[in-house]
Image: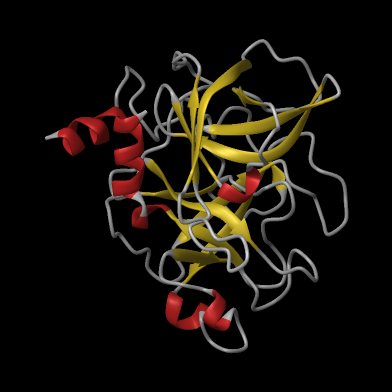
Amino acid sequence: MIKFVVLALFVAGAYGCGLPTFTPVVSRVVGGEDVRPHSWPWQISLQYNREGEWRHTCGGTLISHQWVLTAAHCISTGRQYRVALGKHNLVETEERAVFADTANIIVHENWNPFFIRNDIALIKLESPVTFTDSIMAACIPKSGFVLPHNEPCYVTGWGRLYTGGPIADILQQALLPVVDHATCSKSDWWGFQVKETMVCAGGDGVMSGCNGDSGGPLNCKNADGAWEVHGVVSFGSGIKCNLAKKPTVFTRVSSYVDWISAKMVAY
């Protein structure tokens, strides 16, 4: 019963989850392009305070009124963080934006930075946010659900526009078809580095996530037409962002639904 109540929190609120007011423009193959403003209203910018200036460091996903999902590797001990919600352009003042302080940051207890295992973290906001046309939650997939090969999903973020380039001012989206585990774990792809608790997407040598996209969502539409966060951007090639046969690797959210539920109850 407790688990049911907590999972219900993922879809609570008048706006529901995964159904943006401003529908994303995904009718064609897209990649590395500006998004329709506020069409991914669960996308957040995780920012840290550096000498009084707030700087974007990672992405993340709003999954309820008070909880954000991001990557464990985005969190550094001793840093002060805030969460920017409802943002489109990071360098402009926007009326729709909300900046939330953090109450708790929970990094997975088995996070292993050497092997990049369990790269997932939760952020509890200091106060619940009100859902609006520009701020709402993404849905969470069913526990254990595995995306089929070539499923069309979208990565979103303010990461670098190209290898070594500047981070984006305006939120970007890119179509990244899912690569199944059998393919992604081949020796000339990611090999043993990829586990079944991960999702690979992309790998065509053209589109990928990049530095600064870490922690952000892999957005995939479910059978009911709502958007679910199936992945948390974890790692990619150290050579360049869009290397062929080195797709962006995400933490598979459906492997951690029980963990997410337990932490939301505990905190």
Give the residue at the far bottom of this rendering: 187
Residue 61: image location, x then y, percent = 51, 37
Is 191 situated left or right of 267 in this image? right
Give the residue at the far left of this rendering: 1
Relative to the observer, which residue lies in front, 264 or 217?
Answer: 264
Note whether residue 241 is visible: yes
Residue 168 vs 237, above or below: the answer is: above
Question: Which quarter of the rendering shows the N terminus?
Answer: top left
Residue 226 vs 116, above or below: the answer is: above
Q: Quadrant of residue 171?
A: top right
Q: Residue at x 56, y 47 (%)?
A: 71
Give the residue at the far top of this rendering: 95
Is 163 situated left or right of 59 in this image? right
Relative to the observer, which residue lies in front, 19 or 250?
Answer: 250
Residue 115: image location, x then y, percent = 58, 69
Q: Residue at x 87, y 45 (%)?
A: 166
Question: Which quarter of the rendering shows the C terminus?
Answer: top left
Q: State the count of labels.
A: 0
Is 49 situated left or right of 62 in this image? right
Q: Colour mode?
A: secondary structure
Q: Residue at x 74, y 27 (%)?
A: 89
Residue 55 vs 235, above or below: the answer is: above
Residue 78: image location, x then y, percent = 69, 33
Relative to the observer, which residue lies in front, 109 or 249?
Answer: 109
Note whether residue 10 is visible: no
Residue 21: image location, x then y, percent = 46, 25
Q: Quadrant of residue 242?
A: bottom right
Q: Residue at x 58, y 18 (%)?
A: 100
Residue 206 vs 166, above or below: the answer is: below
